[in-house]
Amino acid sequence: MFRPFALACAALAGLTLAACAHSQNDLAKQAVTPTELYKLQAEDQSDEILLGVHPEGLSAAQDEAVRALADRWRDGGGRSIEISAPKDAANSVAAYRTAQAVRNRLIAQGVPSAAIEQHAYDAAGDAGAPLRVGFVRFQATVPACGQSWENLTATEANVVQSNFGCAVTANMASMIADPADIAGPRHAGAADAGRRVTVIQSYRKGDVTSSVADSKASGVISSSIGGQ
């Protein structure tokens, strides 16, 4: 009579262990910290203006639009700007002059010539096809917080609440000046060859190569604490 009972207990214990293992696997797949629930993300966003082609180049309104585009490009990460002229346009001379005027205005606004790319696109026979000028920049993704709240006192599962960390991530995404920093680190700038030569020459002479110490940065431990 004890054998069936023992078998039943063994089966029940096996099911309990399997349930515990399954529960632990599920918890392992879930977010452990709020930063895993809401991660900083940035996505590509196109910024483009369309300009009508004119034999005389840019109009005053078009010139202002190109100026504003250059300012947004500078604030948006500084990736390449593309100038796309209509291919086989009715007035190819006007399209060429407008494209060159845009290029000159961008360079005058501080955009390096190496960051400007010129292409041609198929206008499909459209006589009024515009000149396309634009770039792709990163846009921070701001999560929508507070959409729903569960019972914060239910902590038996020991998992992160669904809204924890959302406000922090949303604030950071709104405050980061260049969302491209979210997507990846910036490229290192060119080394200062002149400074490198100066330091090497000082090192060979036995001179001090470190920077001059700032007197305001020095600190002294006060002896007034812990007296008699």
Image (tube, helix red, strand yellow):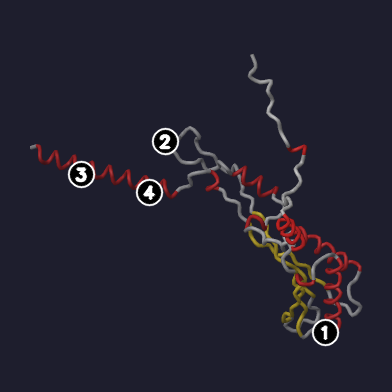
Location of mark 2 (residue): 156
Disc 4 secondary structure class: helix
Q: Nearer the viewer, mark 1 or mark 4?
A: 4
Q: Residue at x 66, y 56 (%)?
A: 181
Going from the N terminus, do you reach mark 1 or mark 3 first? 3
Location of mark 3 (residue): 11
Residue 92 numbered tag: 1
Is 217 placed left or right of 29 in the picture? Answer: right
Residue 25 numbered tag: 4
Going from the N terminus, do you reach mark 1 or mark 4 first? 4
Q: Estimate how packed mark 1 is, as few (under 14), some (14 to 19) or many (20 or more) residues with alpha carbons within 10 Å.
A: some
Going from the N terminus, do you reach mark 1 or mark 2 first? 1
Q: CA distance from mark 2 to mark 3?
A: 26 Å
Q: Residue at x 69, y 25 (%)?
A: 222
- Percent from the top left, x then y, of residue 63? 88, 68
Q: Residue at x 62, y 43 (%)?
A: 168
